[in-house]
């Protein structure tokens, strides 16, 4: 399983791209602005999108992706999401006011966009690759994802604040190799982090102390203009875990 980071920022500007991860050539985990860097042939190859939650920085490329490739491929694109997330996309994006409803185009029996519900703890297997939604604690219904190649595993928390249920699930993963966890704010904005249900370095260290398995840890979703400060604080608060900054175009092999 080849994992390529297309976007990992909490915003845009310059070379910053919002959250999206390409798995092999045919699967996306979230579809932020990073998807826009893919070539047309790469976009055509995408068959599945696993969505963590409905916030714009994680779903903004879905409408453009579908609209771009519908005339260039015969197979539909499947969106894997919780029922609440899909309903939000239907109500506020694919509603004919913001964007056409591709879940009924060209007709309901053969749409370009197909929904597949995911539930925490229930694994979706695609050609030997396993994707399991994990608990998350955010301001909207959200999940993280456990990606398992059979040999190694990667956990992507998505957007979350403190979540004991997440670590119960993560600590059961015997072949865990990589943990990608968000830290959106600096410690000076801890009140905002708590209000928006994100992490800051002080909250991050509390979460990492719940981790019982050795793994490589990468920090994602840094707010633009604050990345250096956040990572300095992460380095001070969580030095024992040796966390690293996730970066665009970074590639992992599982």
Image (tube, rainbow, N blue to C red):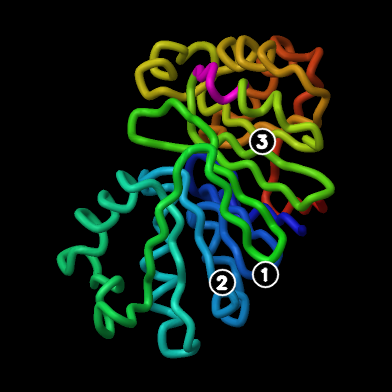
Figure check: 170 above or below 57:
above
Q: Residue 178's x, y, as percent? A: 76, 37
| Residue 239 appears in the picture as rendered | yes
Which residue in the rendered view is the most extreme toward the left? 97
Q: Which residue in the protein does label 3 denote? A: 180
Classed neighbour count for the residue bearing mark 3: other residues with Cα under 10 Å, few (<14), some (14–19), many (≥20): many
Checking the image for residue 25, the label placed there is: 1
- Taking the image as shown, residue 211 lies to the left or right of residue 34, namely right
As displayed, is residue 254 above or below residue 28? above
Q: Quadrant of residue 233?
A: top right
The residue that label 2 is drawn on is: 46
Residue 211 percent location from the top left of the image: 70, 18
The residue at 76%/59% (across/down) is 2
> Looking at the figure, which quarter contains the N terminus?
bottom right
Q: CA distance from mark 3 to mark 1?
A: 20 Å
Q: Position of residue 108 (x, y in %)?
A: 25, 77
Q: Residue 253 placed where, x, y %?
A: 82, 53
Query: Which element is circle 3 on?
Result: strand
Q: Quadrant of residue 242?
A: top right
Please provide the residue range marked out in magenta. Answer: 162-167
- As drawn, 24 above or below 121: below
Residues at marks 2 and 3, CA–CA distance in whole angstroms: 22 Å
How busy is the neighbourhood of tag 1: few (under 14 within 10 Å), some, or many (20 plus)? some
Tag shown at residue 140: none
> CB under 8 Å between callouts 2 and 1?
yes
**Image position of 112 (left or right of 158):** left
Q: Residue at x 15, y 65 (%)?
A: 97
Q: Residue furthest front?
A: 122
For the residue pair 212 and 157, the one nearer the viewer reads as: 212
Q: Inspect this view and state whether residue 14 appears.
A: no
Count every numbered label the image shows and give the total: 3
Q: Is residue 210 magenta?
A: no
């Amino acid at each position: 399983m080849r994992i390529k980071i297309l976007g990992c920022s909490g915003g845009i500007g310059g070379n910053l791209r919002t959250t999206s991860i390409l798995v092999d050539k045919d699967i996306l985990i979230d579809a932020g602005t990073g998807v826009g860097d893919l070539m047309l042939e790469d976009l055509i190859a995408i068959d599945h999108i696993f969505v963590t939650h409905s916030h714009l920085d994680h779903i903004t490329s879905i409408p453009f992706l579908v609209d771009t490739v519908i005339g260039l491929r015969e197979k539909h694109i499947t969106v894997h999401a919780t029922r609440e997330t899909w309903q939000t996309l239907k109500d506020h994006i694919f509603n004919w006011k913001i964007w056409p409803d591709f879940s009924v185009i060209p007709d309901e029996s053969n749409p370009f966009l197909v929904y597949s519900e995911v539930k925490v703890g229930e694994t979706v297997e695609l050609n030997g690759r396993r994707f399991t939604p994990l608990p998350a604690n955010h301001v909207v219904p959200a999940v993280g994802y456990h990606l398992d190649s059979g040999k190694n595993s990667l956990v992507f928390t998505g957007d979350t604040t403190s979540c004991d249920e997440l670590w119960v699930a993560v600590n059961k993963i015997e072949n865990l190799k990589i943990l990608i966890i968000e830290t959106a704010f600096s410690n000076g904005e801890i009140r905002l982090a708590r209000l928006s249900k994100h992490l800051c370095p002080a909250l991050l260290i509390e979460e990492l102390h719940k981790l019982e398995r050795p793994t490589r840890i990468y920090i994602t979703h840094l707010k633009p203009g604050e990345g250096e400060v956040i990572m300095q604080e992460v380095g001070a608060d969580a030095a024992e875990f040796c966390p690293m900054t996730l970066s665009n175009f970074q590639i992992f092999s599982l």
